[in-house]
Every structure is written in C-alpha cells, then in structure tokens.
Image (cartoon, helix red, strand yellow):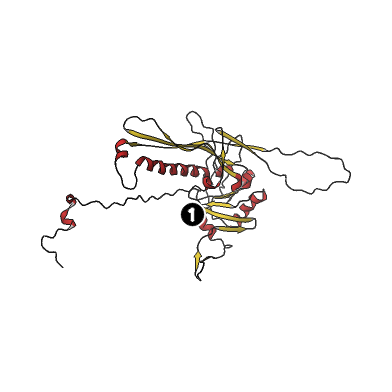
C-alpha cells in the first residue's frame, strides 16, 4: 500500500508539532523491603544508649530422692545472667530545591512528601538489615558510631557451648558467647557445605533442649530452596475451594520436626550462608527514638529533611534460638 500525497504522519510532523506527552501519572515503585522483625517482634521502650536485661535457665533435671526425716542441705545455684546491647543510630537525609518542590511532576503532588515516604521505608529496611546480620556490638566513641549486636552475633557456636552449628568442621565457623558487655562478630570459615536435613533437625533440637521454641526459621532464597528439597518434605498441594483442581506448591512454608512446627520465612537480608532458627518470644526491638522525620533549618533555596531512629536488638535469652553457619 502507498500513502496519499502530502499525508502528514507522526514522523513527518516531528517533535516541534506540539504532540502532548503520554506519561502515566503513576510511579511503579519496586520496594524490596522486608521488615519481618520490626513487624513481628515485641517493641520495648529503652531509656539509655546501653539497654540491659536479665535472663535465667533452669538447672538440668536429675534424680531427686530424699531420706524420710532427713535434715536439709543447701546446694549452690547459678545466678541469673545480665545482658545488654548498645543502641544504634539510623539516619536518612535529603534536600529538595524550592523550584523542584514547586514544579508539577507525574506520579506525585510533592517531591518532599514522596521522599519522606520512600526514605522512611529505606530507614526501616536498614534497621531490619542490621538486626539479622553478623554485626558485633560496640560502645562507639567520639569518632566511631555505636553499633548494636545483630542476631547472628547473639547465637554462640558449639565451640562456645552455644546453639550455633556449622555444616563442616573443616576451617569451621565460630561465634564467641556474649562477654564483658558485648557480642563479638562471628568468624566465617573458609569452607562451606550443603545443609543436611539431619543437621537442620539437630539444630532445632538444640534450642528446644534449652527450653526454647524455634518456631520461626529465617532464610534467604538459597537455603529456602535447600530446605524445600529435604527428603522428609512430602509433595504439597493447595486445594481450590469449590473446585476439583489442585495447585502444586513448589516450596515449603511450614516444617514439622520432632520438636515442633516451624515457619520457614523467606528474608531478603539474612546472609546466604546462614539459617536462623529463632524463638520470636525471646527477641524484641527497643527504640530510644522511634523512627521520625525532622525538619532541618533552611539555608538557601532548599527544603531539608532528616529521618532518624535509634534502637537496639534485644536477645532475651540466647539459648532459646539456634543457627547454622557455613552453608553452601
């Protein structure tokens, strides 16, 4: 086919013809933010940059048979343990020029309001990230930021009589137990190997034996795939109500072991080489300053905002949880 002579096409009119832009009035945000801990753990109000708490454990059960009429004797007992963690300051800042705020943009009425919303989510995401990683605690100093001990650093390894296990004994991982008011950063081994179902069960049993209920397992995608492939996991189906159809579920969200039922929670920020088996009732997050937005003094033609929070992770009793390190 041929065009009729002198027909103007969009190509012929060109960019100077004044065609209106066809721009959607929506911003399709992709926000990979996971805040499982902040959304599910207890919230505690703290009043100092070093927050402390007490925990205790029962003595191991033993044979207990006494003589009729025997006089009492007194045994020594173990005192409760005092734990503590430092608060960490989290901050996001931005500035928007007066002209940028006055200009009309697609997808938002105010650039300042959009950035407050977006960066508050980023701030909470940062808090969650720091809570589940392997950071050691630190009192900080004039030129050093305070840092809270993260979840990995609270669960000591079997080298230190704790509930941390490892996939291999070659160049093994280790995590020192809480001592002298601080947690240490876990040491990663140079060799990793695949997690076995037997090791996974044994790790859950360690926390249960100490009185914990490791009902939640936090994992990244790599280890969730491994758990989903365990031989003990039967093929799962979802029945569609009112229909004979069934959908095959290619993942595991619940795992039943000899010591209980465990939710397998996919978490973006847990390290790929670690599986965290936690008792949620034995963890909390304490805020010295809850996440908030502050307007900073204006200088020049700019609008300044600061989003800030200060808080710490609270491990009420490290023996209630367990972890596996050195996972391939």
Q: Position of residue 245 (x, y in %)?
A: 49, 70
Q: Is residue 156 visible?
A: no
Q: Residue furthest right?
A: 69
Around disc 1, counting alpha carbons within 10 Å, would you say few (fewer than 14), some (14 to 19), or many (20 or more)? some
Residue 106, position as x, y percentages in the image: 31, 47
Residue 32 to residue 243: above or below: above
Report if residue 307 is visible in the image: yes
Residue 311 pos. (x, y %): 52, 37
Residue at image location 35% in from the left, 34% down from the top = 303
Tell me if 96 is positioned left or right of 206 in this view: left
Locate residue 73, reporting x and y percent: 83, 39
> In the rendered image, which quarter contains the N terminus?
bottom left
Q: Secondary structure at mark 1?
A: helix
Q: Residue at x 56, y 52 (%)?
A: 217
Q: Residue furthest bottom?
A: 244
| Image vertical order of residue 8 relative to residue 77, above or below | below
Is residue 310 or residue 183 the one in the foreground? 310
Q: Nearer the viewer, residue 116 or 75?
A: 116
Residue at 65 percent of width and 51 percent of height: 208
Residue of label 1: 221
């Amino acid at each position: 086919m041929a065009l009729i002579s002198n027909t103007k096409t969009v190509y012929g009119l060109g960019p100077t013809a004044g065609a209106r832009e066809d721009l959607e009035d929506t911003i399709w945000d992709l926000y990979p933010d996971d805040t499982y801990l902040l959304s599910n753990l207890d919230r505690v109000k703290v009043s100092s940059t070093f927050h402390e708490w007490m925990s205790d454990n029962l003595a191991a059960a033993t044979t207990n048979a006494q003589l009729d009429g025997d006089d009492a004797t007194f045994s020594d007992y173990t005192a409760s343990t005092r734990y503590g963690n430092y608060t960490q300051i989290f901050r996001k800042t931005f500035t928007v020029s007066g002209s940028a705020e006055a200009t009309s943009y697609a997808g938002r009425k105010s650039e300042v309001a959009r950035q407050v919303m977006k960066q508050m989510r980023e701030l909470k995401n940062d808090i969650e990230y720091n809570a589940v990683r392997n950071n050691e605690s630190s009192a900080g100093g004039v030129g050093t930021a305070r840092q809270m001990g993260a979840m990995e650093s609270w669960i000591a390894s079997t080298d230190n009589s704790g509930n941390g296990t490892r996939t291999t004994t070659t160049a093994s991982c280790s995590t020192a137990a809480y001592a002298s008011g601080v947690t240490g950063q876990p040491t990663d081994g140079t060799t990793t190997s695949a997690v076995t179902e037997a090791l996974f069960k044994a790790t859950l049993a360690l926390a249960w034996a100490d009185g914990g209920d490791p009902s939640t397992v936090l994992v990244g995608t790599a280890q969730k795939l491994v758990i989903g492939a365990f031989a003990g996991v039967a093929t799962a189906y979802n029945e569609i109500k009112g229909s004979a159809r069934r959908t095959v579920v290619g993942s595991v969200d619940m795992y039943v072991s000899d010591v209980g039922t465990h939710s397998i929670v996919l978490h973006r920020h847990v390290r790929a080489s670690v599986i965290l088996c936690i008792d949620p009732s034995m963890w909390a997050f304490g805020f010295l300053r809850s996440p908030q937005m502050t307007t900073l003094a204006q200088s020049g033609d700019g609008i300044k905002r600061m989003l800030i929070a200060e808080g710490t992770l609270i491990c009420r009793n490290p023996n209630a949880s367990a972890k596996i390190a050195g996972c391939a």
